[in-house]
Amino acid sequence: MAEQPNPARVVADSEVLAADLLVGGDARDALDHVRRHSWVELVASEELLDRTERLVTELADADLAAAHRRRLGDERVAVEHPEDDHPALASAYRGQAAHVLSYDEALGSAQAGLSLQPRVSVSVRPPDAFTKLFDAESLYEAAEGGEYPGPDQDPRT
């Protein structure tokens, strides 16, 4: 198995990234945890951004999709992976992320977990579960050390 994942690194699949922009709700709540803290990082490959842009284009329009992609491209930790890999899982593996946010129930299943564990230690959860379990104070202690200073960024900027 590769190095231990970074508990302060998160991957959101294309459906979650699109829902954050277009719907809000659980996806936005989950990703706001990432955006509120400069030490929590969103990890994404080009392929993951490509899929998100295509999805937003289908559901809304190309201009909005392109603007969203630029913003995500500026905010993310970029990783590369083989073309045939699942973009969210490969982004997590290559970016040593501990969390994948996905609405895909198959990715979060026990069977998928057993398949993934020999290769990568990652938690796959829907955004609402991530939000319920997110504990910034203990995560800060594990990832950064020291006393949690509180949120240090506005998630709306």
Image: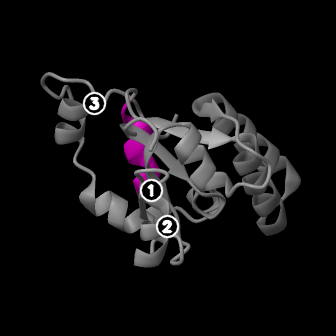
Residues tagged 2 and 3 counted as in contact (Cβ below 8 A): no
* Residue under pointer 1: 118
Whether pointer 3 and pointer 1 mark residues with C-beta atoms closer than 8 Å, the reply is: no
Location of mark 3 (residue): 143
Disc 1/disc 2 C-alpha distance (Å)? 7 Å
Q: Nearer the viewer, mark 3 or mark 1?
A: 1
| Residue 18, above or below 92 | below
Please say if 58 is above or below 68. Answer: below
* Within-10-Å neighbours for mark 1: few <14, some 14–19, many 20+: few
Disc marking residue 104? none
Can residue 136 be found in the magenta stretch? Answer: no
Q: Amino acid at mark 2?
A: Ser
Q: Is residue 44 left or right of residue 92?
A: right
- Magenta span of residues: 30-37
Q: Of 56 and 126, which appears nearest the observer? A: 126
Judging depth in this view, the residue of 130 and 99 nearest the camera is: 99
Residue for badge 2 = 115
Q: Callout 1: helix, strand or loop?
A: loop
Q: Position of residue 68 (x, y in %)?
A: 71, 44
Q: Position of residue 50 (x, y in %)?
A: 79, 49
- N-terminal label among 3 and 1: 1
Q: Amino acid at mark 1?
A: Pro
Say whether residue 36 is magenta: yes
Other residues around mark 3 within 10 Å, as few (<14) / some (14–19) / many (≥20): some
Of labels 2 and 3, the one closer to you: 2
**Along the polypeptide, which appears first: circle 2 or circle 3?**
2
Residue type, mark 3 in image: Ala
